[in-house]
Amino acid sequence: MTLSMVRLFAVLRFLFEGGGRLRRTAALLLLIGIVELAAIVSLPVAGGGILDALVQGEVNGFRRSLSILLMLTAAQIVLSASYRLLLVNAEERLGHRIRERALRGLFNGPYATFERFGGGDLVHRVVNDAGVLKAAFGGVFLQLTHDLLATGAVTILLFRQNVVLALITVAALPISLLVVRHWSGGLETLNRRVKVEMANLMNRLQSWVSPALGVRVFSLEERAVTAVAGQSQVLMVASQEVGALRTKAGALSGVFLSLPSVIVFSYGGYQVMSGHLSVGDLFAFVGLSEMFGTPLRRIIGTLTATVPSMLPSLERVQALLCESTGDAPVQSLPDAVAELRVEDLSVRVGADSASRIVKVPKFRARKGDLTAICGPNGAGKSVFMRALAGLYAHSVQNVVALDEEGRQHAVTPRLCAIVPQTAYLFDGSVAQNIAMFGNPDASRLWSVIDAVGIREWISSLPAQVETRVDGALPRCFSGGETQRISLARALYQSSARVFLLDEPTMALDPKAWAILWPIIQSLRLRGPVVIVTHEPTLLSACDRVYEMAPAGDGSCTLTQVDRKGSNDGYDQAAL
């Protein structure tokens, strides 16, 4: 819980540092909350004054107390509406700010951030985490501040009304709440178990529903029903346990939460009958004691349940915000790259429980050559290509580009034209996808379109190169068409000096590959070309071939295949 609070306030402080308007709004919200609190705690006192006036038959006192009650009620309504309106606006601005800063940190930070958080649901997590912290601003930060102030103010008023009754309330209510919280903790544990069993049931059901054809073909209907029914019975037992504990917890909660009120009414009634306390004072005290209990319940719930539940979101957002250090300075690019050189490269791949280290003592690819990397799936070829592109911040010093004078330059994605194993299309037009959202040069654009052989197809689209593409669901583009757009994007990059092609033949038919192969061969005149491939024909056409395979110790080994009697001293480069 302490760690969660520290992370929460660290994130909020980080966001407040650059948000003057947000700080002013938070201060105004706190001020309105304090004024509203003063109006609220005065309501029971005004109500008690009305009761005393009624008992004593004082018309003027009744009118005065009623006027005060009406004014306090109207003020409380106005202040509450103002507070909620300001809070909604502030929360939405904060949510936007968190999303913007987190996404900026995500995209500007090292590529390893993507791998650490998982790529599949990364955006979903960022948006959800921003929503959690947006709610935390009002539901935790402001509410906790108001509840602490309310508890302190009400405690003072309780002791001013009656010391003995105040001691009973202040001592009994927290004990009752903690006992109830103890029972609630067990109930939450069982509720989590029910959710897990529900997820297991859905997974089990999905595992048998997905291969429905196989179930019918192999006559496994009864096996499927038995498997799903068994998981359903486990869920039923867990749900029954939750129901039984909820019933016990509800009954005991009612007993413990009612004890302070019973004691206050018993002792307070005795004080009224003995003339030491008026009916109005007892009414005011009961109202104040309820105001003492409500914020105290929220404080205990916030500190023991709400804030700890935010810990995963806080960890992810804090990590992303730490990456959000602004745009990196743009480095100048060499006019040409004569050689791509790797020495003592080490990259950790995968989660901690199943990670492996890819180590590359030496590797090189020259301008004018086609350098190929082959090997079985999972050996680390694509990871090595990402390292060659400078995507791993901790390894950029181990990958360098040498210009024609032998000077070393850092390798960055701007220096490389990358065709990934999975071709990507982004939200925008076909032209924007090829020109990477710069101002497309029409002649150059159509030149690369002709080069990859898709002019006829592009011309058949509704708006030709201006046809919109949904990055999540491209408009019926085939795998080969998407792959050729990806290759056109690489050709369009005027700043590219290094070309990294990961499985460029994937999704291409022989006719399309016959068109593209001369284009790929011509790239060697612009800089080093590194190709990951399994195609024997392509491997035989390359000038240098490396074979990557997993080693017995969990690392990988890169062996240069002897070509034309020369292996340049890289017969056994351990990877």
Image: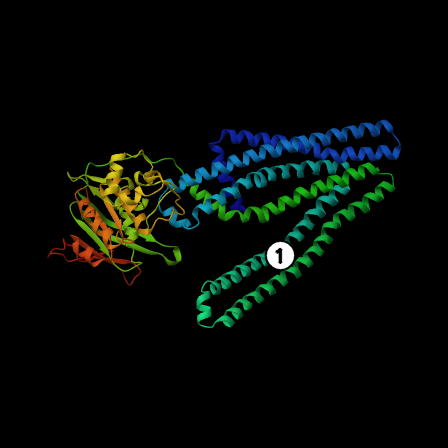
Q: Tell me: residue 401, above or below residue 208.
A: above
Q: Is residue 517 visible?
A: yes
Q: Is residue 42 above or below residue 167?
A: above
Q: Residue at x 80, y 30 (%)?
A: 65
- Mark 1 neighbour class, 10 Å CA radius: few under 14, some 14 to 19, many 20 or more: some
Q: Residue furthest right?
A: 57
In front of the other: 215 or 352:
215
Q: Nearer the viewer, residue 275 or 394?
A: 394
Q: Quadrant of the C terminus?
A: bottom left
Query: In the picture shown, does residue 499 fall above or below 198?
Result: above
Looking at this view, is 3 or 320 the one in front?
320
Q: Which residue is mark 1?
A: 187
Name the residue: 32% across, 39% down. 465
Please tell me in which quadrant of the rendered image residue 88 appears. top right
- Residue 410 seen in render: no
Q: Residue at x 87, y 35 (%)?
A: 55
Left or right, 294 with respect to 575, comes to: right
Task: State the image coordinates of residue 561 (x, y, percent, origin top left).
Answer: 17, 58
Residue found at the far left of this picture = 565
Which of the colour schemes (rainbow, by chain, secondary structure, one colour) is used? rainbow
Residue 11 lies, in percent from the top left, at 49, 40
Q: Position of residue 557 (x, y in %)?
A: 25, 58
Q: Nearer the viewer, residue 551 or 338?
A: 338
Q: Is residue 367 left or right of residue 316?
A: left
Q: Quadrant of residue 192?
A: bottom right
User: In the structure shown, which secondary structural element does the residue marked by tag 1 occupy?
Assistant: helix
Count the numbered circles shown: 1
Q: Specify the amino acid type for callout 1.
A: Leu
